[in-house]
Amino acid sequence: LPAGPDGRFQGRSSDVAIIGAPIDLGAGDRPGARYGPDAIRTAPYLSGELYHMEFQTEIFKYLSVVDAGNSPVPVASHDGAIANLRKFASTVVANTDRLVTLGGDNSIVLPVLEALAERHGPVALVHFDAHTDTWGADLPALTHATVIRRAVERGLLRHGHQIGIRGYGPPADVLQWGEENGLTCWNMEDIEESGLTEVIQVVCERVSGPAYLSIDIDVLDPAFAPGTGTPEPGGLTSRELLGAVRTLARHLDLVGMDVVEVSPPYDHADITATAANRCVMEFLAATAHRLRTSA
Amino acid sequence: LPAGPDGRFQGRSSDVAIIGAPIDLGAGDRPGARYGPDAIRTAPYLSGELYHMEFQTEIFKYLSVVDAGNSPVPVASHDGAIANLRKFASTVVANTDRLVTLGGDNSIVLPVLEALAERHGPVALVHFDAHTDTWGADLPALTHATVIRRAVERGLLRHGHQIGIRGYGPPADVLQWGEENGLTCWNMEDIEESGLTEVIQVVCERVSGPAYLSIDIDVLDPAFAPGTGTPEPGGLTSRELLGAVRTLARHLDLVGMDVVEVSPPYDHADITATAANRCVMEFLAATAHRLRTSA
Amino acid sequence: LPAGPDGRFQGRSSDVAIIGAPIDLGAGDRPGARYGPDAIRTAPYLSGELYHMEFQTEIFKYLSVVDAGNSPVPVASHDGAIANLRKFASTVVANTDRLVTLGGDNSIVLPVLEALAERHGPVALVHFDAHTDTWGADLPALTHATVIRRAVERGLLRHGHQIGIRGYGPPADVLQWGEENGLTCWNMEDIEESGLTEVIQVVCERVSGPAYLSIDIDVLDPAFAPGTGTPEPGGLTSRELLGAVRTLARHLDLVGMDVVEVSPPYDHADITATAANRCVMEFLAATAHRLRTSA
Amino acid sequence: LPAGPDGRFQGRSSDVAIIGAPIDLGAGDRPGARYGPDAIRTAPYLSGELYHMEFQTEIFKYLSVVDAGNSPVPVASHDGAIANLRKFASTVVANTDRLVTLGGDNSIVLPVLEALAERHGPVALVHFDAHTDTWGADLPALTHATVIRRAVERGLLRHGHQIGIRGYGPPADVLQWGEENGLTCWNMEDIEESGLTEVIQVVCERVSGPAYLSIDIDVLDPAFAPGTGTPEPGGLTSRELLGAVRTLARHLDLVGMDVVEVSPPYDHADITATAANRCVMEFLAATAHRLRTSA
Amino acid sequence: LPAGPDGRFQGRSSDVAIIGAPIDLGAGDRPGARYGPDAIRTAPYLSGELYHMEFQTEIFKYLSVVDAGNSPVPVASHDGAIANLRKFASTVVANTDRLVTLGGDNSIVLPVLEALAERHGPVALVHFDAHTDTWGADLPALTHATVIRRAVERGLLRHGHQIGIRGYGPPADVLQWGEENGLTCWNMEDIEESGLTEVIQVVCERVSGPAYLSIDIDVLDPAFAPGTGTPEPGGLTSRELLGAVRTLARHLDLVGMDVVEVSPPYDHADITATAANRCVMEFLAATAHRLRTSA
Amino acid sequence: LPAGPDGRFQGRSSDVAIIGAPIDLGAGDRPGARYGPDAIRTAPYLSGELYHMEFQTEIFKYLSVVDAGNSPVPVASHDGAIANLRKFASTVVANTDRLVTLGGDNSIVLPVLEALAERHGPVALVHFDAHTDTWGADLPALTHATVIRRAVERGLLRHGHQIGIRGYGPPADVLQWGEENGLTCWNMEDIEESGLTEVIQVVCERVSGPAYLSIDIDVLDPAFAPGTGTPEPGGLTSRELLGAVRTLARHLDLVGMDVVEVSPPYDHADITATAANRCVMEFLAATAHRLRTSA
């Protein structure tokens, strides 16, 4: 496993490996997610001591983390960028127990899921997003709006939970297709009714085996994440999202996670990148806690 | 009814008509609401399919919507701008069942209410705002801070509910004047205590007959709506507001609605304009649902 | 007491005095808090009438407020700036019942507490912050991350409550040091579990005697306060914070309060400065209410 | 003469008086010039010592300057704002030898010229602007695009030079009207051909008697002045403009000057406000030099 | 020729047609040029009267202009976007004497040149740019850095002049390739030495027959055009560029022109889009003047 | 010599070494220069090929460059930061022929000059700045406004040329002190009169022996460098400055150079950081050319 250019999350060995996917040619609106990985890495936090107060765990004492750097991206070819990432992710997955991918637009999740399937087989998906990303019945293209359909078509998912869905689509037939293919949709209306805590508890009960956590940062309300491609008002708070990540990473057997759709040119004072950074940190902290308490 | 310059919301005929009121000479602080109408129209959303998941309704299948364009505005004359809007709104109201007005500062609501009164008589008002806009006992001017008083004085309102009020005014005598004139004030303290859902339910029970929904975007906390003239911390979340619009538009007989005080020069990444856009979308969706289920 | 350069909060005499501490050499990241005092003073609000609707109190009818201006700050010397503030605060404290300090980075709280201790002795601290600011066991320096430890070391605090703590530190030994020295830590997890209202009620019960309220604006989520030095996602909403200030100022015997770490270069549309301004306003309103009802 | 709220330019007595005209209801695009006066006053510069190196003159040793504050502005009435300014300027003109007005949109120049005419009679105008502001043959309104025509119509100008004109208008008949009424137009093409230095020299030769210098900041290229209402590429550099102001103020008998159309919401890092501030400073320096050398 | 969605430049018939190419997948840095066409169209200018003072010509009296709208762009496929543009441009070129293309990144010039070659054969190129865009000897891809090489390879250019070149590349062999293929390179050093006016005069003398004017907005210094993908300090002023466009369009037989690489997310106060808009306006004005004086 | 964290300018060995001085506690206004070094390093440019077209030189073929990273900076102590830099610079100077320092505020130049004096003795200074930085006769503090006086006092300069001086100070006695101590002041008025090219030629003639080039980025007009602490209108263009650096670095025996006062929080679209980056690049290119042609 090649050493990454960024020493940020570097630890002793390789419980977790981090890669960047600086790709945004799969996004229809507000490009810029290509700068997401570096912005997420350099978002401000208290360096040195990294002690998680709830878990009472020194994160890097129980967890080895390697940053394997960014996948190479050619100019003007989305297919080429995706193919490179497919290879890069495979190499890294072979050398780590858990893969963290920093996007990039949402389309980068497909090659990551393919790389994980090589080692772990199809996974259960927990997907935070304002959109289901299951459009594209007619058109074969891989974009940030079709990526979950492509993953289903390729048999990469055992089943999935999509949380935070809102906005004006997809239409009924697409939603029905999702249900028929094992995707459970938790709209913001469901979350308003039950509370996110309860939704997450149900998800934890229903998911078993190797699982994958995918976070499109636009699941947050635009107030918390202005720096994204397709903002949709009425979303989660960062407090809700971070709590959910913490719970999921503590209870599920996550073999990978990602944060995608952070678009720095539309961010302000790095608040979106910082929220994304903390999603990764909560995953790391909960994983360290799992390793510590299971040891 | 003239065809609007913007095909955005254009449908087959005219259940709803949309007009823009690019006027901000009635605002005391942070001008720029003149650019609100176009910013609200072009806020990003998923075009093409517009399916409302909660209502399970394809919005434009059950609803004809026409965008009648912007009211003409002379330079340097607030009176002239208001007079033009008065005429323009009258023409449009004569040809549509429901009028949506995109502001503009809050003062533009007066000529709109006058135009609606011609056809529907005085209306019940549901008013989301950080401020009561009932100042102006001494001075006759129409501004964004006196508009509701002017509407009461001209007999345009049967009664009203003002939701989200906060800040350091108006003083006791002005509040008392409101109560004596049929305006019920729901402060943020009331909302904290009961929850917005319950407040809205009470409002729905108390309002009957032709009603009007007015949304000053500053009812949102500045985190959700930085692009406005008189931001006041401690406000609603976009999740609360959109839910309330959905419920009100489903249950009340709304003959018109507006969103005002979106000031793009103070916005960031269009989050304020997008929130305003979604207020209109929720109104359209709920109205489509009413038409579908009542058919 | 010298008259301040800014007539904003100026009243008849001196129930409350306001000073600015335009100092940010104690901050490690994102400087700019030196511009905080003036930004907080000029944040937009409805001038003239200042009537608090919940307390039904005309604030400046029951409260005399003087703005004593900004403490002088030499270039390139944090020690010099702190020494000047120490003297300036002492002079002001001798002439007012309650001191409001507008920061400035968090390190400015130490000389303020020293000045207050001269007159009131050690105080009880209620501290809103994302960070405990109790680092610095090894290094003697006064910075925005060590200020509370320094205050404890100098015997300026009887005991304290730290509310809103989150992030990845301080480590276990530092947290333990805090507990052993009378500091109770209310993490965001505690707040999620119990609700802030209940936490504040407990704090009110436990605190008696002269108390001091310190608000690092980064206790708010970055969505509500992007303009700060060390933003930490997952924080309070402005609605929660303002309600808490209102309750605390109504029930405790506050001899001083501050708002620190507002960094205007990182703010957008003044929303951070406005939130800070309202913290002061709620303190003033509740104090006026105390004076009115106790008279 | 009332003392101003801002001690900035305050000197011993009254060779020069400064007023602010925070009015922007006369502007058709990009409002915000109402915040111009305060932004120009607080633009950063080296305070304390104010020594002009070219003139070798300590400015405030030879010049008494008073800041008389801002003219009061009612909400929603351009006519009211202009009438107030008319009165305010008259009072100040009666007590000072030279009036400096900080705009505000360009329409505020008319009441200022009227106030000056009371004492000095019609003046010669030297006008830096991208636009001639001589539209409005058909419509009587006073706006930022008609102000010079209105001044001519009211007999306030002996003759004038308009420097920096560019863009796509006014049309031929309006330009001809200007020539027939004593207005000489120096387009950017003329300036490109001859150089601004030579143009200014010619202007100095042709102007005699009481003169008035009006600077619409949009005479600068938008690179130097992004914060303005109607930016027009291809303009002057700040170096050219400041040199021209220096020369004109040294050689002409200026009884007043203004800087208008600074719109802070569209500015970045205060560069437009700072350029405007320096136009005033160069006027003050050259005037001090005139007084020193003529004494 | 289909009527465009934007009536901006619409005239009676078709001396000039305008199209938008909202494509930026060919850009390596700072995406966002997909929003260039609409930003350039809506950049502020004095609408209604459009009289060119130097040419003494009412532009739209002598020139018919049609806006044919934007070329359709699929998500995630640069090849698809370029192919669509190729077809769209061909249709438009068949119906107009001169084609104006609003980019989009620089790669969009290739399909435009192909469409023009169908009707006019190979053209002479006058190319304003900080970069030669002749990289790509080894790799066949069409990007914004290889577009001129591709045009040469396909025989679309008779010869060319590249003006404003600077930065640290291309290397010697690439420069030599350009010279051998009829491309004359005018570096900023040449322009500093001779002045742009003289360079343009030489270019006018050397170019004859059907010519094409391509303007990468990054030929301007970043002060004048911050909103672009690959800014390079030390560039032209907008005054220089607009004068050059005026001269070239007056003297050459231009069958098309473009402005590319305007990236609105990186712009401030629309100054880059406005400069690009004026490049088009100067082309239109000079063309109107040619038609008027040759009639 | 330790390898730097940033491979940017890394070459084979050590003709030039680059260090960062992320220090801004010496600045009176607009802090943020602590982020200058990293912003200058990561400013966009064409990576890979770095061929200087005027010098016809592949820069890194003839020049070995090492980036030694940033000097460590303690929180809250300007003295500590300066002391650290003093040591760090000494170590690096011992191992390289030329030192490039990326600021940081202007005060960081003093320890750099001290480090250079150890090896090279007092140097000739060529100083681009809007300000002379020779204040501080009374106060001993090292700040960004006193740094050149301190350097003179400590005997670190043989003589100096200060280019681009403007604004309203320093006063006559300070200017005279400069002249008496070997500092020649070239005001913007001198540059307007003679042209910068001629001024630089004179400077080249007058300077001999080991020389040092110091560039305060505020020598540029704020249009070209908005991201700086004390912007002063009427400055150089980036074209002028880069040409001057090129000439000086080609003709003088520079043993070091710096770029200081880049403040990223006040920058837009990185234009200031990019201009600073290019100052370093021109120095490197000219030095490579010197080595190539002298070999």
Image (cartoon, coloured by chain):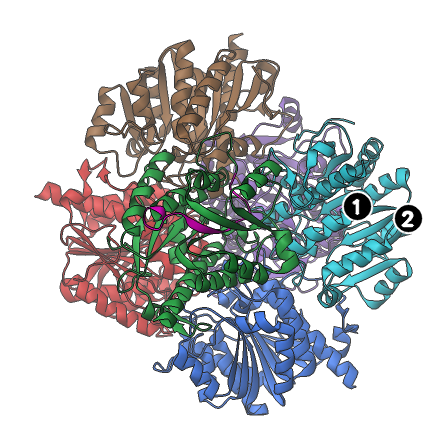
Chain colours: A red, B purple, C brown, D cyan, E blue, F green
Query: Over which residues does the magenta segment extend?
Result: F117-134
What is the residue that sits farthest to the top in this orientation? Answer: C295
Please, what is the three-letter code of the amino acid marked with disc 2? Arg
Residue for point 41% across, 34% down: C25
Label 2, label 1: how far apart the Cα atoms are = 13 Å
Residue D30 visible, this angle: yes
x, y percent for residue D165: 75, 61
Residue C253 visible, this angle: no
Please, what is the three-letter code of the amino acid marked with disc 1? Val
Tell me where residue D49 sits by quadrant. top right
Numbered label attached to residue D109: 1
Q: Where is D21 relative to E68, above or below?
A: above
Residue D263 located left or right of residue E50: left
Q: Secondary structure at mark 1?
A: helix
**Labels 2, 1: one chain:** yes
What is the residue that sits farthest to the left in this orientation? Answer: A295
x, y percent for residue D50: 63, 37
x, y percent for residue D190: 76, 66
Subunit bearing disc 1: D
Numbered label attached to residue D261: none
Residue E217 located left or right of residue D245: left
Residue for point 39% across, 51% down: F102
Q: Which residue is labeled 2 in the image?
A: D154
Dot 2 or dot 1: first in sequence order is 1
Can residue E7 be found in the magenta stretch?
no
Q: Secondary structure at mark 2?
A: loop
At label 2, counting other C-alpha atoms closer than 10 Å, the crowd grade (few under 14, some 14-19, many 20 or more) is: few
How many labels sit on residues? 2
Quarter of the N terminus of chain C within the rendering: top right
x, y percent for residue A283: 24, 48
Residue D118 located left or right of residue E114: right
Q: Where is A230 relative to D248, above or below?
A: below
